[in-house]
Image (spheres, helix red, strand yellow):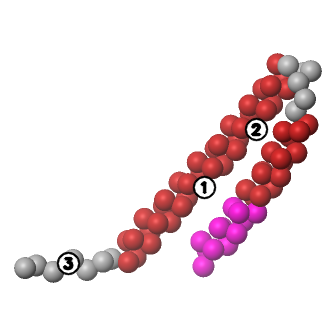
Amino acid sequence: MRGREPVDWDKELLKTKKIQRRGLGISALSLLFALAMIGGVKFYRPEASVSKVLLPAIAMFFAMGVIFLVLMKRWKK
């Protein structure tokens, strides 16, 4: 009976970081899409009230920026 192959932890860490970067990119892209949709609604229907949606969107953008900065500092180590 053959044993398991040894695990290359450096390779596994690189795969994990790649998956994290892809997830962050998808989250940022989703945020940009949501902001574009809000902007599109305001452009095509100026009478629509966007203020209740705009403040949470700005807060989410700020939160994404903080998360991005924290992750960048962590990846540099």
Q: Look at label 3 and name its amino acid.
A: Arg
Where is residue 49 shown, x and y percent of the image? 90, 29
- Compare marks 3 and 1 and give the one earlier in the sequence: 3
Q: Look at label 1 and name its amino acid.
A: Leu
Which residue is depicted at the point 91% across and 37% down?
Answer: 51
- For mark 3, give the secondary structure: loop
- Compare marks 2 and 3 and give the one earlier in the sequence: 3
> Contact (CB < 8 A) between labels 2 and 3?
no
Label 1 Cα crowd, 10 Å radius (few <14 / some 14-19 / many 20+): some
Q: Mark 1 sits on what residue? A: 24
Q: What secondary structure prevails in the magenta region?
A: helix
In the picture, the disc for residue 4 is 3
Q: CA distance from mark 3 to mark 1?
A: 33 Å
Which stretch did the figure color magenta? 66-77
Where is residue 37 shown, x and y percent of the image? 74, 31
Q: Look at label 2 and name its amino acid.
A: Leu
Quadrant assignment, res 33:
top right
Label 3 Cα crowd, 10 Å radius (few <14 / some 14-19 / many 20+): few
Which residue is depicted at the point 72% across and 38% down?
Answer: 34
In the picture, the disc for residue 35 is 2
